[in-house]
Image (spheres, rainbow, N blue to C red):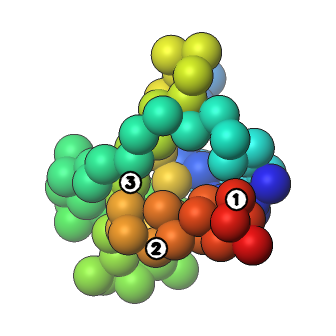
Amino acid sequence: MIKLVEISYTNHSDQYRLQEIVVNSTHIVSIREDAETAGIHAKGWLPEGLHEAQQFSKIMFTNGKEIVVVGNPDTIGAKAKNILHG
């Protein structure tokens, strides 16, 4: 299990929010850079407190669900690998 910060969009409040989540790394299928969220961040639409050069990743799970998290794919992948391979 790894801790990540997910970025989600809430329709009812029409804004983005950050929330800490715990993910079972054995269910991760792929991790890729998310340039779309980086563009949203550059426009100032994400919550305050993120560094201007922050990178984002899209994670796909075995059930087909995708989430966007704070961090570049290499960092997220290394976290998952450390848990899987100790």
Which residue corresponds to the image point at 56% horizontal and 39% vertical from the top-left?
A: 28
* Mark seen at residue 75: 2
- Give yes or no for contact between labels 2 and 1 (Cβ–Cβ under 8 Å): no
Locate residue 6, reporting x and y percent: 60, 50
Q: Which residue is mark 1?
A: 84
| Alpha-carbon span between mark 2 and mark 1 | 14 Å
Picture coordinates of residue 42 (x, y %)? 22, 66
- What is the quadrant of residue 46 in the picture? bottom left
Q: Amino acid at mark 3?
A: Ser
Relative height, residue 62 to residue 73 (above, below): above
Quadrant holding the N terminus: bottom right
Label 2: which secondary element = helix
Q: Nearer the viewer, residue 49 or 72?
A: 72
Q: Which numbered disc, 2 or 1, marks the residue closer to the eye?
A: 1
Q: Secondary structure at mark 3?
A: strand
Q: Which residue is mark 3?
A: 57
Name the side, left or right, on which 31 lies relative to 63: left
Q: Which of the marked residues, 3 or 1, is nearer the chain's N terminus? A: 3
Task: Evaluate if marks 3 and 1 touch, with contact meaning CB atoms under 8 Å apart.
Answer: no
Q: Contact, CB < 8 Å: mark 3 with mark 2?
A: no
Q: Measured along the vertical axis of the image, is residue 39 above or below residue 36?
A: below
Q: In the rendered structure, which amino acid carries the disc numbered 1?
A: Leu
Q: Report, in whole angstroms, how far the alpha carbon at label 3 lies from the one at label 1.
A: 19 Å
Near mark 1 (Cα within 10 A), the count class, few <14, some 14-19 or many ≥20, is few
Q: Is residue 70 visible?
A: no
